[in-house]
Image (cartoon, rainbow, N blue to C red):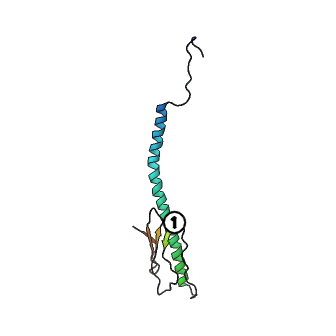
Amino acid sequence: MILSSDRRIRVQSGFTLIEMMIVVVIIGLLAAIAIPSYQVYANKAHVNACLSEAKSYGNEVFTLLNDEDSASTPSSPILSSCQSITDATGWTLNTWQKIEAITKAPSNARIECDIPKGTPCVVLP
């Protein structure tokens, strides 16, 4: 649109610098809140996955040691979520003990399953 021979009305296209800065600040604030929360939930998920793995192995050991077939013995644990689990290979009812597991980094939490007493697996502080 031409108002005079030298002046033209410009139609704004795009964003101004201040609008872009406001958007960047809002995204930064959301990230500052969301990332630490995500890390806490991810650590809890790692611990719960290892806890589940340790419980499963503890149940297998308990079942194999208490069945009527004396030839069945526990096998080595298969690790996926845990860094380590106590190996119960060769245990008998006279030699069984607690099963301990350690989660993978970054949490490295300890989990204890007291199989002889029949107490549930717990995450130790």
The residue at the point 59 percent across, 14 percent down is 2
Above/below status of 20 relative to 77: above
Which structural element holds mark 1? helix
**Mark 1 lies on residue:** 49
Amino acid marked by disc 1: Ala
The spot of residue 89 in percent (x, y) is 52, 81
The spot of residue 68 in percent (x, y) is 57, 87
Left or right, 67 with respect to 21, comes to right
Determine the residue located farthest toward the top in the rendered image: 5
The residue at the point 56 percent across, 23 percent down is 11
Q: Residues within 10 Å of mark 1 (few under 14, many from 20)?
A: some
Above/below status of 13 relative to 24: above
Determine the residue located farthest toward the front in the rendered image: 6
Determine the residue located farthest toward the left in the rendered image: 125
Q: How many marks?
A: 1
Q: Nearer the viewer, residue 35 or 56?
A: 35
Q: Nearer the viewer, residue 120 or 64?
A: 64
The spot of residue 110 in percent (x, y) is 43, 69
**The C terminus, quarter of image:** bottom left
Tell me the quarter of the picture where residue 1 sits.
Answer: top right
Q: Nearer the viewer, residue 89 or 41?
A: 89
The residue at the point 56 percent across, 21 percent down is 10
The spot of residue 107 in percent (x, y) is 44, 63
Left or right, 60 with respect to 123, comes to right
